[in-house]
Amino acid sequence: MSNQHLAHHRAKWKSHIGFLFAAVGSAIGLGNIWRFPYLCYKNGGGAFLIPYFVALFVVGISLMILEIGIGHKMRGSAPASFASISRKWEWLGWWQVIFIMFGIMCYYSVIIGWCINYFVYSFNLSWGQDTGNFFFNDFLQASSVLASKNPFELGTIVMPIFLSLAVVWFLCWLVVFKGVQKGLERANKIFMPILFILMAIVVFWSVRLPGAGEGISIYLTPDFERLKSPRVWLDAFGQIFFSLSLGFGIMTAYASYLPPKSQITRDSFIIGLVNCIFSVFAGFGVFAVLGYMAHTTGQPFSEIVAESIGLAFIVYPKVISMMPHFGNLFGVLFFGALVIAGLSSAVSIVEAFTSAGIDKFHHKRGSLVSTLCVTGFLGSIIFCMQGSFLWIDIVDHFIMQYGLIIAGFFECILIGWVYGAEKLRMHINKHSVAKTYRIWDFFICWVIPLFLGLSIVQGLITELKAPYGGYSWLAIVLIGRDWLLYTLFAGIIVAGHEWRSDPRERMLE
Ligand code: PFF
């Protein structure tokens, strides 16, 4: 098939709203419901909203415009788009998609699997009274490994997690296999409204619980002193990256299916704002629930707020068991919302890789998605063993602290300096009604790379002082650092292969 022919036949969204639902579906994920409220509490309550929204407007929306803009202009996945700019930069696109597929997706799918299990457990509150013990000992079966803190003691596969993992990969396969319109668009058009309804019910239910007001006032009482700490700002920027699914080539792949006449600037604002408003809204629910728990047990608030994983799988089950009426229904709605939020993000990861494989090797979608999902599933097995909890912790730390930020940094250098921020802005403005202003060039060329560069240096300084999380250096190097390096090597190798046809032929005028 000629390339002109391929470009002409490129998959397309059926409707603009379909694209928006899919992009918002990718952005809203587990991170919005469990990670954001915790970060908010840890970093000065309501005051955290300041760095968070600064990060959204300075870095988040600017990069969203960049990723959507480049996918729209080059009509290709991240590797195809970057190769169209310069073959020397193709590795970056491959690194991004390999990295999310075999880094993030392998453990993200396992956590969605946990949510599926907890969704089922909610029906008869199987976690009993001691939810912490249930989570670590009965569910993860990780007690011995957690005590030794040695991630190389992997133990055996935990069956319920393994089975739910298979369900997650099967669902992802099904959606991506069916293609852009019949798979991604249709699934997100169903997922998103259900997610919004479930979340609305959970939040309104939570704020009516006794003691909810105290929780919410802690959530919203700002401690401006905390804003002086660089850590707070780093957390805000990291969260915006992860939450908006930036730096992974996802938005680029999704934008490549847009028609020429598109609203790139406006859509970037919509996706960014909807995602962040959703987080803030979910925060009300989470803090109301924590307030209820403090009120009922008489425990101080600071003892209740757990790290993100603990919040969803230890604190929530406890609260659900304490509810006098319909606790199990509450659990079903909450864990159901988590499963849907997670799945709509997971399919976007698989699609980013699939679209890259189709662009470069002209593979058939069906066989590519099947191979990819089977490989991904096998790769995820390492995260559903008794000792995997520690692996998740280490890999997540490196991906959050470095992976995304390094990818975002290089993206800005490539577009800002090699391709030209102004050139891309001209393209965006030619096709959209709402304009992107000149200041965007300055953000892409200077402000964002400078900030991301500083974050990387600051992170490295802390990293080198002591191994993260009290693990051994060996574990940090082999699991954390090497995860970044091997995916990079793989990216460079794939980028070295010849293109079946010139990626630049797809480009829009
Ligand atoms: N944005 C998703 C969340 O907030 O949970 C997470 C995510 C999705 C991360 C897709 C990475 C990704 F490629």
Image (cartoon, rainbow, N blue to C red):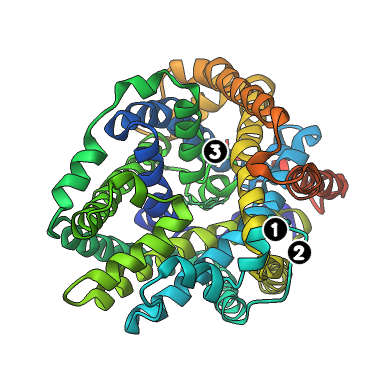
User: Looking at numbered disc 3 in the image, what kind of residue is underneath it?
Assistant: Glu
User: Residue 113, how many percent across, how many down?
Assistant: 53, 71
- Of badges 3 and 2, nearer the viewer stands 2
At numbered mark 2, what does the secondary structure look like: helix, strand or loop? loop
* Relative image position of residue 63 (x, y in whole percent): 51, 32
**Labelled pair 1, 3 in contact (Cβ < 8 Å):** no
Image location (x, y in percent) of residue 151: 73, 57
**Residue shown at 48%/34% (left/top)?**
235
Badge 3 marks a residue whose secondary structure is: helix
Residue contact at pointers 1 and 2, CB within 8 angstroms: yes
Indicate yes or no: mark 2 CB to ligand 1 under 8 Å: no
Question: Amino acid type of disc 2?
Answer: Glu
Q: Which residue is mark 3?
A: 67
Of the image marks 3 and 2, the number of the one nearer the N terminus: 3
Q: CA distance from mark 1 to mark 2?
A: 9 Å
Disc 2 designates what residue?
153
Number of other residues with Cα within 10 Å of mark 3, as a class: few under 14, some 14 to 19, many 20 or more: many
The answer for how far apart the CA atoms under marks 3 and 2 are is 40 Å
Residue shown at the point (67%, 63%) measured from the top left: 145
As shown in the figure, which amino acid type bears the numbered disc 1?
Answer: Ser
Residue at horizontal 59 percent and vertical 81 percent from the top: 163
The secondary element bearing badge 1 is classed as helix
Q: Is residue 145 visible?
A: yes
Depth order, front residue of 465/406: 465
At a point 61% along the width and 37% down the height, the residue shown is: 401
Which numbered disc flags the more N-terminal residue, 1 or 3?
3
Residue 345, horizontal then vertical, whole percent? 49, 58
